Amino acid sequence: MTVSITKIELNSYSKLIAFFKFNGQIINQLKQSNCKSYKATGSWNLKVWYTMTLWENENEIDTFYRNGIHLEAMKQSKKFSSKIQFKRINQPNLISWKEAKNLFEN
C-alpha cells in the first residue's frame, strides 16, 4: 500500500475560497475512486493544508491525480499556492498527522 501526503501553503487568505472549492470537489472524486482511505487537516492559521490518501499502488495514485477535477486543480494550483509538496511512503495504513508533518521537516 502507498500513502500519499500533500502539503499546500496558500499564497494569501484571499485564496481560501478557491482552495475550498477544489478541495470539496476533489474529496467527492476521492469517494468515487479506488482510494482506500483519506483524511485532510489544516493549520491553525488556515494557510497550510495537508491531505493524506491510501492507495493499493502507485498506478492508482497516478490515475487519480491525472484525471477529473484533480487534474483541473493541479492546472489552477499556481493561482492559489506557490508551495506544494508531496511525499509518498509504503505503509499499510494512514499515519498520524504528527508523523506526516515531520516528513516535510526533514
Image (spheres, rainbow, N blue to C red):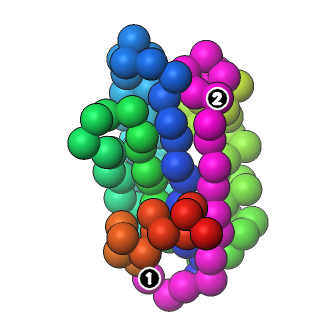
Mark 1 or 2 closer to N-term? 2
The magenta-colored residue range is: 76-94
Determine whether 55 is above or below 48 in the image: below
**Quadrant of the image containing the N terminus:** bottom right
Residue 86 lies left or right of residue 102; in this view the side is right
Front-most of residues 53 and 15 = 15
Disc 1 or disc 2, which is closer to the eye? 2
* In the image, farthest residue toward the front: 106
Image quadrant assignment for residue 37:
bottom left
Q: Residue at x 36, y 70 (%)?
A: 98
What amino acid is at disc 1? Asn
* In the image, farthest residue toward the top: 14
Q: Which residue is mark 1?
A: 93
Determine whether 5 is above or below 55 in the image: above
Q: Position of residue 47 (x, y in %)?
A: 39, 33
Badge 1 marks a residue whose secondary structure is loop
* In the image, farthest residue toward the bottom: 92
Task: State the separation of the CA atoms marked 1 and 2.
Answer: 29 Å
Q: Is residue 8 magenta?
A: no
| Residue 32 visible from this viewpoint | no
Would you call the spot at circle 2 few (<14 residues within 10 Å), some (14-19), or many (20 or more)? few
**Quadrant of the image containing the C terminus:** bottom right
Would you call the spot at circle 1 few (<14 residues within 10 Å), some (14-19), or many (20 or more)? some
Determine whether 11 is above or below 92 in the image: above
Is label 1 in contact with label 2 (beta carbons under 8 Å)? Answer: no
Q: Residue at x 66, y 23 (%)?
A: 78
Q: Which residue is mark 2?
A: 82
What amino acid is at disc 2? Ser
Q: Residue at x 43, y 75 (%)?
A: 99
